[in-house]
Image (spheres, rainbow, N blue to C red):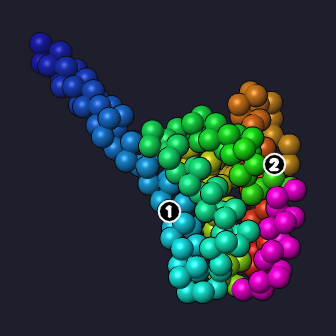
């Protein structure tokens, strides 16, 4: 009888833990993954207010649109929703990591030659990578394995995620202020 009582208590504790994790902690943890994107948006606005970047400039428009395209999709953030938002941004031409757009971005950064603007742009790419890696166990494992050049067999969704991550990783590492 005593053993049944202990099993019931243990089952209740596990049930409470699962409930609190799924319905209380996890949604808030997932929302915190997006905070770096808010920081990028704030930094862009600061650069405009400080006079270092014009509101009509290509860089401001590009990254402000991209951040504002991603953030609304993050209310119920899951990896699938985030990758879908990134795919939608690519389809609408708002993804700065696409090679054609990235060449324009690098040219604009070279013309301005301002380290703060370079860092704001790099922080955007890093924020997107952070959201992707934080939401995917597979990407965390790949990061732990030092980013294999060719990952093992992936599903089509995982391939899309991997491709987006690689585009953003390459973009962040090829910026002038990349460390």
Instruction: Tell me the element at label 1.
Output: helix
Residue pointed to by mark 2:
148
Q: Residue at x 24, y 31 (%)?
A: 16
Q: Is residue 16 visible from the viewing direction of this image?
A: yes
- Locate residue 8: give its quadrant: top left
Is residue 64 shown in magenta?
A: no
| Residue 153 percent location from the top left of the image | 80, 30
Q: Mark 1 or mark 2, which is nearer to you? A: 1
Instruction: Give me the C-alpha separation between circle 1 and circle 2.
Output: 30 Å
On screen, residue 40 above or below 27: below
Compared with residue 167, is residue 12 higher up or lower down, i.e. above or below?
A: above
Task: Provide residue 81's location: percent of width, then percent of height.
Answer: 57, 36
Is 103 magenta? The answer is: yes
Q: Nearer the viewer, residue 71 or 11?
A: 71
Residue 30 is situated, as x and y percent measured from the top left of the image, at 45, 46
**Left or right: 64 in relation to 62:** left
Q: Vertical placement of 94 versus 3: above or below?
A: below
Please tell me the numbered disc located at residue 38: 1
**Element on which disc 2 rests:** loop
* Region in magenta: 100-114
């Amino acid at each position: 009888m005593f053993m049944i009582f202990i099993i019931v208590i243990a089952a209740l504790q596990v049930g409470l833990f699962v409930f609190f994790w799924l319905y209380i902690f996890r949604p808030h943890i997932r929302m915190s993954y997006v905070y770096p994107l808010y920081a990028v948006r704030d930094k862009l606005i600061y650069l405009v207010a400080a006079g270092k970047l014009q509101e009509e400039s290509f860089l401001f428009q590009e990254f402000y649109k991209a951040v504002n395209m991603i953030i609304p999709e993050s209310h119920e953030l899951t990896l699938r929703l985030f990758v879908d938002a990134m795919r939608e941004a690519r389809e609408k031409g708002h993804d700065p990591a696409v090679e054609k757009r990235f060449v324009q971005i690098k040219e604009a950064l070279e013309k301005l030659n301002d380290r703060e603007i370079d860092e704001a742009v790099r922080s955007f790419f890093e924020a997107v990578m952070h959201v992707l890696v934080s939401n995917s166990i597979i990407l965390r494992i790949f990061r732990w394995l030092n980013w294999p050049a060719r990952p093992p067999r992936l599903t089509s969704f995982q391939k899309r995620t991997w491709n987006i991550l690689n585009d953003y990783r390459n973009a962040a590492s090829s910026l002038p202020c990349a460390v």
